[in-house]
Amino acid sequence: MLSSSLRNQLLRWLLPAMLALLLAGAITAYWVALRSATKAYDRALFDTALAIVDQLAIKAGRPVLPLTAQARDVLLTDKFDQVFFAVHGPSGELLDGEADLPLPPPNSPRESWQEGRYYYDGYLRDTPVRVAALRAERGGQTLTVLAGETLVKRNALVREILLGMLLPEMMLIVVSLAVVWFGVKLALQPLTALREELAGRSQADLRPVSAEVPEEIQPVVREINELLNRLGHSLNTQRHFVSDAAHQLRTPIAALQAQVEATLAEPDALVRQRLPGILAAAHRLSHLVEQMLTLARAQPSLASAQPPVALAEVVQAAAEDWLPVAIKKGIDLGFDLAGGQVAGNRLLLQELLSNLLDNALRHTPGGGSVTVRCGEDAAGPWLTVEDSGPGIPESDRDKVFERFYQSPGGRSSGSGLGLAIVREIARQHGGQALVDRSPELGGARVRVVFAPQPEMTASISEEKGA
């Protein structure tokens, strides 16, 4: 199921709503602007009609408009629009002015005439105009005076008012979208801290999450902590079961070995011929139980909370145990040691190397070679064990780290837990174990790379800067 970002979801919800508000605001602003412009300019147009009424006179019983050419120019002059007038008699006949200036609609209701005046829209020779009509009494006759003008300044005022009202709204929308776009990133920074804290942990670190998050995310953090608590309880239960089972098996196995060794001392040759196989099986079973116990005892550990351990010291401690085994098998066990420190558990690191040496010595034929190397580089501290044995096929190089896995056709008497223990201990120290072919000895090479130490990282950065 594809999921979109929170920022995109907020924008999808917010943008239509803001566009709807913008449209409603535009309609409202247009109506307010048009109403304001109409009222303002209708009043000025009425003043023009009123000025014409004041100039009307009755001569010989007929109404006339005695305006000079100069007075007409002053009356009809406007900076933006064309102004027109017309005077109609009682029967609608034109007495003076523009003949094409439209009269009020014949069906206009009387109540729409306010104090004898009426405003309406019309066309003068296909040009839209606004007209003010005024009825006046002169000499007992009802005259209709019309004053009209084009709509240039009215439309300009509507545009100005509309722009003045909509521009802040559009800026508000842009600012709101920017706030959402950048605000979501800032608001999600606590989640980034939470993700980094979880990503920096090993698979065995089940401590409660302590990242500071907003109140809305705290229920999620609480559920994560509850899940980690339940998972830790389950893993502890499993680990205790394996540990208890291994402890319970050690006693009867030790008794079995002691009985077999005692029987081997008997003079009966037939019995002594059968018991070596039983003793070897008991030793293998004892080794399996010890490895299971080691795997169960591997407790979670953070590299920053552990003291530094020198890899060279770990190798030297293991050499004391494995040199006699190598000599007995006629294998040349060599060492190439350099500086390198790992923040971790010394006993677990020794167990890691012991399993690597046990695996290498078991698969290397007599007269072969096994070499242990350690050091530190930009990738971090490392430890390798390589041998001159048959090596590990590429198809099995990932599988050999699985528990109880053994290569098909292999003749090893191991339990299949050695490399699984190596991988587990490497992971707990922030590292990884890899298998390839030794370029010098031709057999298998297991390389364990640990997490780099802060001091080493800082020194490398200073060297690059220099």
Image (cartoon, grey):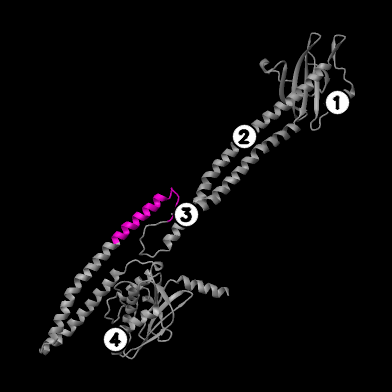
Residue 230 magenta-highlighted: yes
Q: Distance between the Cα atoms at labels 2 and 3?
A: 42 Å
Amino acid at circle 1? Val
Residue 65, placed above or below residue 175: above
- Mark 4 vs mark 3: which is more N-terminal? 3
- Mark 2 vs mark 4: which is more N-terminal? 2
* Residue holding disc 2: 27
Amino acid at circle 2? Ile
From the viewer's perspective, is the residue at label 2 or at label 3 nearer? 3
Amino acid at circle 3? Pro
Q: Distance between the Cα atoms at labels 4 and 3?
A: 55 Å
Which mark, residue 74?
1
Q: Which residue is pictured at 54% across the width and 41% down the height? A: 17
Q: Is residue 446 visible?
A: no
- Mark 2 vs mark 1: which is more N-terminal? 2
Which mark, residue 190?
3
Q: How many marks?
A: 4
Label 3 CA crowd tier, 10 Å (few <14, some 14–19, many 20+)? some
Query: Residue 83 sits in which quadrant?
Result: top right
Under tag 1, what secondary structure? Answer: helix
State left or right for residue 127 relative to residue 326. right
Q: Which residues are magenta?
A: 211-234
Which mark, residue 438?
none
